[in-house]
Image: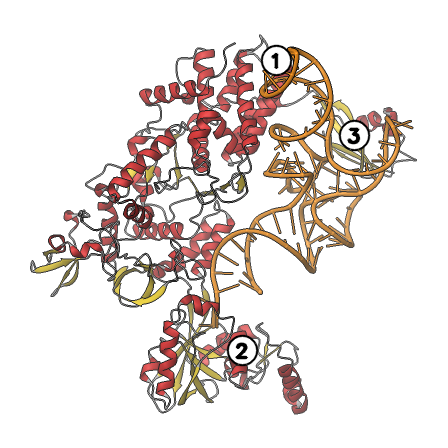
Amino acid sequence: MKNFDHTKVEKKWQQQWESEDIYATDDSSKKPKVFVLDMFPYPSGEGLHVGHPKGYIATDVYSRFKKMSGFEVLHPMGWDAFGLPAENFAIKNRVHPRVAVEKNIQNFKRQLSHLGFNYDWSREINTTDPEYYKWTQWIFLQLFKKGLAFESHEPINWCPSCQTGLANEDLESDGTCERCGSIVEKKPMRQWVLRITDYADRLLDDLSLLDRWPEHIKEAQRNWIGKSEGSEIEFTVKGSQERIKVFTTRPDTIFGVTYMVLAPEHELVKKLAYSNTEEVEEYVVKSQRRSEMDRLDETKEKTGVLLRGVSVVNPANGEEIPLFVADYVLAHYGTGAIMAVPAHDERDYAFARKFALPVRKVITHSGNARGVDSIPLLRWLANNLWYTRTVITTNPGTLINSGEFNGMESEKAKEVITEKVGGTIASTYRLNDWVFSRQRYWGEPIPIVHCKTCGAVPVPEDQLPVTLPDVENYEPTGTGESPLAHIDEWVHTSCPTCGKEGKRETNTMPQWAGSSWYYLRFIDPNNNDAFIDPEKERQWMPVNVYVGGDHAVRHLIYARFWHKVLFDLGYVSTEEPFTRLEFLGFILAEDGRKMSKRWGNVINPDEIVKTNGADAMRVYEMFMSPFENTTAWSTDGLVGSQRFLERVWKLSQNTTTESGPATVLELHKTIKKVGEDIEGFKFNTAIAQLMILLNVATEHGISGEDFKLFTQILAPFAPHLSEEIWRETFAENTSIHLTAWPEYNESQLVKETVTIAVQINGKKRGSVEVATNADEPTVVSAVRAEEKLSRWIVGEPKRVVYILNKLINIVV
RNA sequence: GCCGAGGUGGUGGAGUUGGUAGACACGCGAGACUUAAAAUCUCGUGACCUUACGGUCGCGCGGGUUCGAAUCCCGCCCUCGGCACCA
């Protein structure tokens, strides 16, 4: 018997498949369509480590299975190649980003091809290709025309090291830059912003449509959007026309307001008249200088300044209360101003304690608010005991000390009080609009021309793409302008509207732009005349299975946002782009840490393919743990998978004339289970079942015909070995990957006899073998016939519980 | 603090419409083959008690429901992830 030479066999079939073009997708096919999508990679200079292909292996297995099951499958691959990492790599290595990216893509493609993936490479896309980003720019113009893209001068996150503005999504939770770890500053500058907040409610509500998404991803998105519902209420400034609008989730506590606070950046801080201007200015400047990080770092120690001479009128009771500026109130959340209720908010309480402000309890949980109110002494005791114990409650309850509303429940009072003080029911979001411009070179140019008379003018669609020009220096300028600003001949152009002198927008789009719509490009990858062919779009969308990790909020929120805009404009036919999301767990290094050059624990798939084979790596990565688990790589485990494949090969050369009955039974069981498990992304148990079948077949014998069925259901996991057995050992003419998935025979799944577990008083004491579907008396007498079991039955059974073909419990 | 996911042998993990816990694999131990080693094959492998037959205990902890609980209910502990001075 010849040995299995994985290197030779894998290379042979990879070439054969390519020359036979067996993975081409046919748009005109009449078969039902399935769109299986990977999160396409950013082609880094470091190449792949063994963790990267895990998701690609899964989609490969899944799409092969769907194809064999009679579906026309779209399973494409491409490159997300714009963005800061590519640019920084290029600067460091003194190569033009385009050249570096080209080289990296070639390397990635080589690495992927060695794993035997079934991508239809004729649909390969690259976000940095002008024919691709033409349409990224086109989408921007649609957003602009719809009023969803606008210029803003608000302070934004500025990374001093990357020298560019960043969206909130690009920051770590401690306020540092996710790329370089620098502390991010607030810097006022002109930038393009997308009005994603207009879609906040839909992005939130439509999560309920996504019942095939993991709960933790939906939860992360809900947290990110961070909707809270409450009221907006206006307070008037005494002796002035100015009003302070606050957002509160607790209008029911308005009688407990003892002071008000403005964020340092609030416009009224400059407008109002107060006596201590210097002190206030100093505080405002100081708090602006403090980075976001410092602000968060302060462990609840509150700071602030009173605006001397200003008093604000509470619309609920006409009370005059003081006004503060304090940085615990955030300018970009709500209205940037709050009504402070120290008795029922921990932050307000901390501030009130520090500044010796009154605390007035207006919510009780005792349930006899009336009694407390009617006995002054008791009320005094209740308030003061509670006050000195410094226990505050943030829970809803019954109103007290609230005039006509005493005795009302919080929920009811929220509504009634809001109405009474002339407020409105309102929602506010943690989500901010998407800062969309970057002051860097390697991104899509924003297709806008600035004209002195016409303002910001969109580049006409027939002039797209606005191509990224070559520059001498693509390093950041440090002035807050993109390197593109230095290329005079590119910047200077004529205004598309009036024809006079105009200047091109020199900011570029963020990394996330190209990936926010790429799935659509795969459907119609070479269309230069239209965004997408509507008929093809309807055929393939939505994506049936989307597989990837990491991008739980950013990419998935941005893509959903753009998709909804395109839906509103009629370019796509579905509300949501991805119906089913499978989130993959990462592969850690053998030492349990992340694979990283820094730790020297990176395993290169090229090495594994060479020494153990692509099939062994594929099987191992699918078998190592449930798909969504993060698990450490184990070379021993890999060798185990390799051994399994070698035993498959051995048995393929040693088939018998007939299969043993146990083999037939197990074969049909396996066909059923493997199909179901692949559909459910439970690859580890699918492979376990294939191993069980191999063990049974080795022991009881398997015929050539039955072995071919086994080979077919193994094929999605180990395409090379399966093809070798299919075409060489069994001399088939066409590829195993074009064959139909075997059907299992329901009648072959039923055994003649079954083993029934025997419990006496709920304790397992043994088992009996009886005919399938035997009735209860038969099983009982079988148990009685067995000395070892019957000796436990003392006296008459009180009760017998019998579960057909499974278990009998005799209670005595 | 709020929210989400999870906790099963030495390890990765099976098993969750309540019904034989530990499938499959790794590791480990013993044996076969070999001059020897590797590879391969066979057997064993949750813990404890027992010469054996067999028994007792076991799915993070403590209760409960049930003939029967890893699975359901109540109360805790821990790990991972998201958000967090968000009004």
- C-alpha distance separating marks 1 and 2: 77 Å
Placement of A787 over or under B46, stated as above or below: above
- Label ID, residue A549: none
Observer-side mark, 1 or 2, equals 2
* Foreground residue among A339 and A533: A339
Observer-side mark, 2 or 3, equals 2
Q: Chain of mark 1?
A: A
Placement of B53 over or under A475, stated as above or below: above
- Label ID, residue A776: 3
Q: Which residue is mark 2?
A: A350
Q: Which residue is mark 1?
A: A701
User: Where does residue A431 sit, x and y in percent of width and height?
Assistant: 40, 61
* Foreground residue among A244 and A121: A121
Helix, strand or loop at label 3? It is helix
Specify the quadrant of the image occupied by residue A526: top left
Density class for disc 2 (Cα within 10 Å; few <14, some 14-19, many ≥20) is some
| Three-letter amino acid code of the residue under disc 2 | Ala
| Three-letter amino acid code of the residue under disc 1 | Gly
